[in-house]
Image: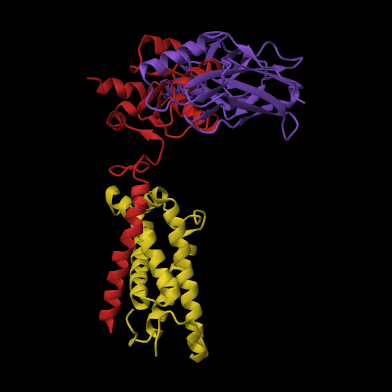
Chain colours: A yellow, B red, C purple
Amino acid sequence: MLNGVCFSCKMDLSSRNILWRIVALIVGGIFIYAGVIKAMDPVAFANDIDNYKILPWPLAVRLAFYLPWLEMLCGLALLLRSFYRGGLFILTGLVSIFIIASVVAKARGLDITCGCFGHASKNWNFSGHLALDLAIFAALIALWISSPRQQQEL
Amino acid sequence: MKASAVRQALLLIALAFVPAIGEAIYFRDKVSWQSPIPASELVTVDQARSWGDNVIWVDARADNEFERDHIPGAILLNEDRWNELLPHFLGQWSPERKIIVYCSAQSCNASREVAKRLRDEAQLKNVFVLDGGWEEWLKDKR
Amino acid sequence: MNTNFSRLIGVLALAALVQSARAELKWEQTSVDLRPAFNDKQAVAHFKYENVGNTPVHFKSVHASCGCTTAQTQNEQVAPGQKGEITAIFNIGGRTGTQVKTVTVQTDDPERSSIVLTLKAVITPLLEFQPTLVYWQNGEEPKPKIITAKANKDAAIKKLDVSSSTPDFTAKVDAGSAPNEFRISVQPRDTTKAVYATLTIKPDSPANTGNMFSAAARVMPSAPASKSTLSTIRHDLATPAATAASPSQ
């Protein structure tokens, strides 16, 4: 079966696959949104990364320019089902690193605003954020497991 | 097969560099690449010196203290004569320069008050307060 | 037996005497809230004290937290039963909003050798401007920019006179969106050369005692200010005012 940019193929798929498609759409949309928010204000994002006090500033600021675009591209990969597993792979990695960094920062007593949804999420609390991130992480793992391995490369 | 996922991932990673570098070029003058702009309003004397000529010094102390001695080039702007002194300062200011307000020492509040008013009333950006004040400046004076 | 007993009485009496030889300064209030009127140049707080002990109290120092506040005690030495006050005079200057100033008093009272007196003043100015500076970049379209003036509602200001120190800027005043609000519209003639002007704003209020307020308008220089640009700015500052008064309606 051909995957890829083939929306007319939906007719052939079972309702289970449609469910996964919807999940992929939602998760992809979340990452595109998150990426756009962060790309609009790279300096604010650089400060948010710096707040974790894990990376030196010069690295944090360069990452602040790069990461949002990676997020957007991977989100797009989920949406368009192009480079799908590659996108899932990266996003899973990003979310894991992020969850670990948040927990470490919290343990160190650092007061961080998440920065994952840019300054839009400034007022959320730690547990709310963590819950959302774990949910996204679970969704990504689920999508990974449910995606067919014999995918045609695009 | 995991290999294809990794290859796709590497391609995405490489692809993301293109817009990222484009954005970095667009923002190149608006970002401090080497050291962070202080998250709080405080700057140390050393940090202030590293900014070189790009600084406007604002003295928030009383008139007589300013007259006795002040940081070279500093403009007097205290709350006693705020309405008189403010227009003169605003005439000297320009958006590219960083403003550093100081008063006598760490403990005095005047510099923070003046800095806050410059941000709130005149809507100026890049307003900072000298950590340690005039006292700290004297220590480092060469 | 007798001598031991009388010695004991003597010691107890001495102890009792030493115990009761206390100095004590009682304060009517250690924190005073003031609401000076917009015309006031000073806010004065009276901190009344009374020596309710039986030895005199001596003021070692009376020291205010800032140079803007002076504090004095009525008497250096307070005899038992004597009353007095520490007067704190806060020079408001150009300050606005809630101002908290403290006076630290040192005495020789062993119980309370240091007392902090607090003066809290809420200052509502006659006029507040937002922002106090409007500026245009060199070459920017010379569209008018607005300074919003908020007047103290107790001042009953009907009209604002705005004049620019140079004719390079024109200023117009209109009523604002809320009562006691005015919109000052400032516009440069052109934005090709660097100009600086002080805008002098005179409120027309029966209660006003010749108060004048200033805001600033500028066209920024195109390159870092050269010596000639600075001398142009200095010249503008010296030029006599060109009036551009308008009614507020």
Residue A28 lies, in percent from the top left, at: 45, 71
Residue A64 lies, in percent from the top left, at: 35, 54
> C241 or B90: which is nearer to us?
C241
> B102 or A1: which is nearer to us?
A1
Residue C220 lies, in percent from the top left, at: 46, 26
Quadrant containing the C terminus of chain B in the rendered view:
top left
What's the residue at 52%, 12% (across, down)? C56
What's the residue at 52%, 21% (across, down)? C20
Total numbered labels placed on residues in the image: 0
What's the residue at 33%, 88% (across, down)? A150
> B1 or C60: which is nearer to us?
B1
In the image, taking residue C120 as reference, residue C245 lies left or right, namely: right
| Residue at the left extreme, as displayed | B142
Q: Is residue C84 above or below residue A107?
A: above
Quadrant containing the N terminus of chain B in the rendered view:
bottom left
Q: Is residue A57 above or below residue C151?
A: below
Residue B139 lies, in percent from the top left, at: 26, 22
Image quadrant where residue C32 sits: top right
In the image, taking residue A128 as reference, residue C126 lies left or right, namely: right
Residue A51 visible (yes or no):
no
Q: Is residue C237 above or below residue B132?
A: above
> A140 or C34: which is nearer to us?
A140
Residue B73 visible (yes or no):
yes
